Image (spheres, rainbow, N blue to C red):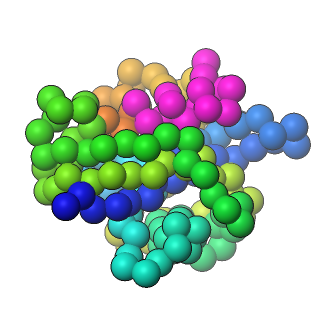
Amino acid sequence: VPIVYVEAVPVRVDSLGNVTEVGLLLRQAADGTISRLIVSGRVKFGERIRDALLRHCEKDLGPLALPRIPVEPAPFTVVEYFPHSEVSGFHDPRQHAVSLVYVVPVDGECTPTQEALDLAWFTPAEVVSDMVKKQMTGGQDRILRLALASVGQLP
């Protein structure tokens, strides 16, 4: 049975709502490598999607990140991770997972928790560059392109 996950692409926006920066965590990925990753985690039994998003944003970005999560969040895409990368291009060696993916604006001070080694902010052009793509695993670089396209900001 697939596990349900939520993933959040943390962004900072200007006064017009344009994405100015995208936040990426640096931590150990599912395949054991040190990689740039977006906020992610599973949805607990009986937990609302909104509550899971808030919990994972606060866990990964710190309690003062102040993520703006709508009352009724709707994902911009759904991604299926498989233990074998050739099935969908999204890969998690541990499991079959279905992930609801969101773009989440953050207004506060982000401080990565002990699970993350670092949190770095990239411009939209930087986050889709080959340099950042090489630092990511599991297909999450594709999620970044989809996220920026969903808000009309793909360079």
Point 11% across, 39% down: residue: 84
18 up-or-down from 101: above or below: above
Majority secondary structure in the magenta region: helix
126 up-or-down from 55: above or below: above
> From where the camera sits, is residue 120 visible?
no
| Residue at the extreme right | 15
- Where residue 141 sits: x, y (%)? 39, 33
Q: Nearer the viewer, residue 64 or 77?
A: 77
113 up-or-down from 123: above or below: below
Q: Is residue 32 left or right of residue 43?
A: left
Point 71% across, 66% down: residue: 71
- Where residue 112 sits: x, y (%)? 48, 65
> From where the camera sits, is residue 101 visible?
yes
Residue 107 on the magenta segment: no
Q: Nearer the viewer, residue 31 or 75?
A: 75
* Highlighted magenta segment, given as a residue range: 142-155
Quarter occupied by the C terminus: top right
Figure quadrant of residue 40 = bottom left
| Residue at the extreme top | 155
The total number of labels drawn is 0
Figure quadrant of residue 7 = bottom left
Quarter occupied by the N terminus: bottom left
